[in-house]
Amino acid sequence: MDRESLDSNNMMNTRDCLQRAWNNTMELVRDFEMYSKNIDDGKVSGTFKKMAEEQGMMAHNLRELFNQYDNQKK
């Protein structure tokens, strides 16, 4: 993380927090999708599939917030 990403208290700025949260959520989507396809137990597989869909919605919402925030700052 570069110095421009940190504020005066060494905290991440809003844009970087949104971007990092989106990236982390997308990674969970990929993981849960993979688990749902590789697990033989139908109940567990279905649970992971549902979790992937829920995380996908969260990722979508985070990306929308990021885009709105990023466009305001230009």
Image: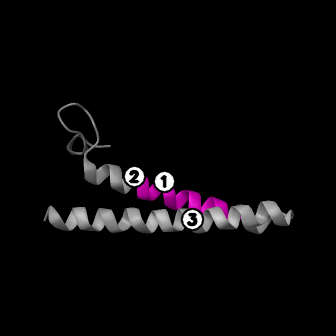
Magenta stretch prevailing secondary structure: helix
Badge 3 marks a residue whose secondary structure is helix
**Quarter of the image that includes the N terminus:** top left
Mark number, residue 54: 3
- The percent coordinates of residue 21 (x first, y second) are 42, 53
Q: What residue is rendered at 23% in x and 62% in y?
A: 69
Q: Is residue 24 left or right of residue 50?
A: left
The magenta span reads: 21-34
Which residue is labeled 1 in the image? 24
**Mark toward the start of the polypeptide (3 vs 1):** 1
Q: Are marks 3 and 2 in contact (CB under 8 Å)?
A: no
Badge 2 marks a residue whose secondary structure is helix
Amino acid type indicated by mark 3: Glu
Q: Is residue 6 left or right of residue 25?
A: left
Q: Are marks 1 and 2 in contact (CB under 8 Å)?
A: yes
Amino acid type indicated by mark 1: Asn
Gap in angstroms between the C-alphas marked 3 and 1: 14 Å
Mark number, residue 16: none
In terms of image quadrants, where is residue 6? Answer: top left
Q: What residue is rendered at 22% in x and 63% in y?
A: 70
Q: Nearer the viewer, residue 54 or 8?
A: 54
